[in-house]
Amino acid sequence: MLDKKVADLLNEQVNKEFYSAYLYMDFANYYADEGLDGFRNWYEVQAKEERDHAIMMRAYLIDNGVRVKFDKIAAPDAKLKEFMDPLKAGLEHERYVTSLIAEIYNAAAEAKDYKTMQFLDWFVKEQGEEEKNAEELIKKMKLFGSDAKGLYMLNQELAARTYVPSTNLPANA
Ligand code: FEO
């Protein structure tokens, strides 16, 4: 049985991971409307990964005897006016998620819940990668995005991203 605070925080995080998927689909909607299908693809893949994070946490809770509860998913609230806006909002969001994972990790450490700490290790690493990806996107956009040809090339590069399910996903996800 999990510590109640740890279980509650993980359950809340399930909702927040679904929100992340929702937010990134909203970014994809924005880019679809702007005709940038590569950027759209990049965020659609990102949204699938976020959904997977929610599924992984849900499965962990269930496997540890917790009755998972779903709450409303908030509406995406990023203001998207320029091509750079989703990229910046994405980095800000990932930094926020990193802080949430750290909060759960700290609660698990306090409860001497080594199993959950080990489970969260994957997410700590993943957050590092996601922040790095978000930072790199911003860098590339700054370098190439103001020029039509550069933007075209960057859009093509982002169109090549493919979804790879995490090996940590439950078999029936
Ligand atoms: Fe699942 Fe990007 O946080």
Image (cartoon, helix red, strand yellow):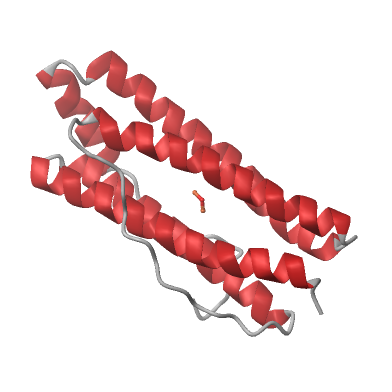
167 to the left or right of 7: left
> On screen, 76 above or below 86?
below
Name the residue at 34% across, 59% down. 22
Residue 163 appears in the figure: no
Tally the numbered discs.
0
Quadrant (top left, top right, bottom left, bottom right) of the N terminus: bottom right
User: 41 or 3: which is nearer to us?
Assistant: 3
Name the residue at 30% across, 38% down. 86
117 to the left or right of 166: right
Q: Quadrant of residue 44?
A: bottom left
Which x, y percent locates residue 68? 59, 80
Which x, y percent locates residue 133? 46, 34
What residue occupies the far right of the structure in this picture? 112
Residue 106 appears in the figure: yes
Name the residue at 54% across, 60% down. 166
User: 165 or 103: which is nearer to us?
Assistant: 103
Which x, y percent locates residue 62? 65, 81
Q: Quadrant of residue 60?
A: bottom right
> On screen, 67 above or below 87?
below
> On screen, 79 above or below 164?
above
39 to the left or right of 9: left
Q: Quadrant of residue 57?
A: bottom right
User: 46 or 163: which is nearer to us?
Assistant: 46
User: 150 or 62: which is nearer to us?
Assistant: 62
68 to the left or right of 21: right
Name the residue at 15% across, 39% down. 36
